[in-house]
Amino acid sequence: MRDMSDIRNIVILTGAGISAESGIDTFRAGANGGPSLWEQHRVEDVATPEGFARDPELVLRFYDMRRAAIQTKKPNPAHFALARLDAQWPGELVIITQNVDDLHERAGAKRVLHMHGEHLNAWCTSCDVRSPWTATLIERPACPVCAARTLRPDVVWFGEMPYGMDAIYAALGTCDLFVSIGTSGAVYPAAGFVQNAVELGADTLELNLERSQGSRMFHETRLGRASELVPAWVEEILM
Ligand code: BV8
């Protein structure tokens, strides 16, 4: 691992585990054995374009329930620690999140990239405009721009192209440190970023409740809760 003083550019990847202690269910039940999202619904039924075409009401209700739920949750110390790092870090920094909640932003983070979209946006498949959205979509409301009743969750489903891939690969190409927080490493291309980082010469650190599927590719793994591990790591890197 580099000496801390040689680290200029940082790429952070977050997953559902960073929001778990805010009360937002993860996709795969973590070591804490909490409920997981996929236990209630099969991925193919609620997180694919085919599932949406087959049963739009089921999918719209699934996302309406989650969109409402996240608005009752609050950022936890891990989100606040990353927002502090974002504000104080003099070099390049980007928080690439797989999460579709807005807890990074509500904690004050600015340099956030939602590669899998955002619950609080609705995407009109007629005019392609994404509009801020905190209400429900089940009643097929009119698009605020073109009035068509073709709004869907602005969330990247399986088989769809994640957002910001060019910016992500550019950031991985210049980063000195890649930090993965609260993700199982089960879904690509996000799960492959650590491999890109290693091949491009970055140091890699994993902060997670349990070892992720890509754990062996990290130079260092720290196991524990994000609300404890992340503030401690930010304190260390800002020293
Ligand atoms: C793509 C938004 C091409 C939706 C999500 C066959 C057909 C088609 C595609 C594929 C295929 N086979 C493979 C693929 C690719 C596919 C894929 O990877 N499938 C998997 C299942 C094998 N990927 C895609 O389709 C992607 N698109 O490939 O396009 C392409 C390729 C390359 C470059 C460009 C384009 C699109 C995938 C996006 C799917 N959408 N989310 C929604 O939110 O509803 S995925 C969703 O699950 C998340 O966003 C996240 O990405 C993923 C994994 O979730 P995690 O965040 O890791 O959460 P998880 O519950 O799994 O783990 C939580 C972790 O936290 C655990 O490790 C736990 O221990 C830890 N934890 C728990 N509590 C705590 C904690 N850690 C710390 N503290 C705690 N307190």
Image (tube, grey):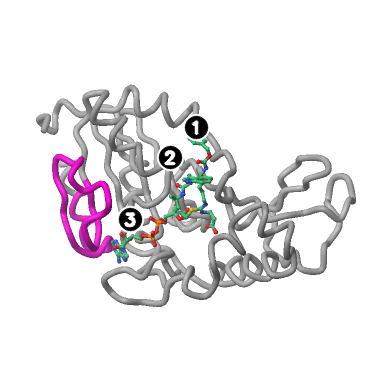
**Distance between the Cα atoms at labels 1 and 2?**
9 Å
- Quadrant of residue 125 in the image? top right
Q: Which residue is mark 2?
A: 189
First to last magenta residue range: 206-233
Direction from residue 175 to residue 237 in the image, left or right: left
Q: Amino acid at mark 1?
A: Met
Location of residue 122 in the rendering, given as x and y in whole percent from the top left corner: 70, 53
Tell which circle, 1 or 2, labels the residue nearer the N-terminal end: 1
Magenta run includes residue 76: no
Location of residue 227 in the rendering, given as x and y in whole percent from the top left corner: 27, 63
Residue 184's label in the rendered image is 3
Could you tell me if the residues under marks 1 and 2 are in contact, i.e. CB atoms within 8 Å?
yes
Indicate yes or no: mark 3 CB to ligand 1 under 8 Å.
yes
Location of residue 157 in the rendering, given as x and y in whole percent from the top left corner: 58, 51
Q: Residue at x 61, y 63 (%)?
A: 46
Location of residue 72 in the rendering, given as x and y in whole percent from the top left corner: 54, 73
Q: Which residue is mark 1?
A: 165
Observer-nearest residue: 118 or 91? 118
Q: Residues within 10 Å of mark 1 (few under 14, many from 20)?
A: some
The answer to whether 181 is drawn above or below residue 86 in the figure is below
Q: Residue at x 35, y 38 (%)?
A: 192
Image quadrant in which the C terminus is located: top left
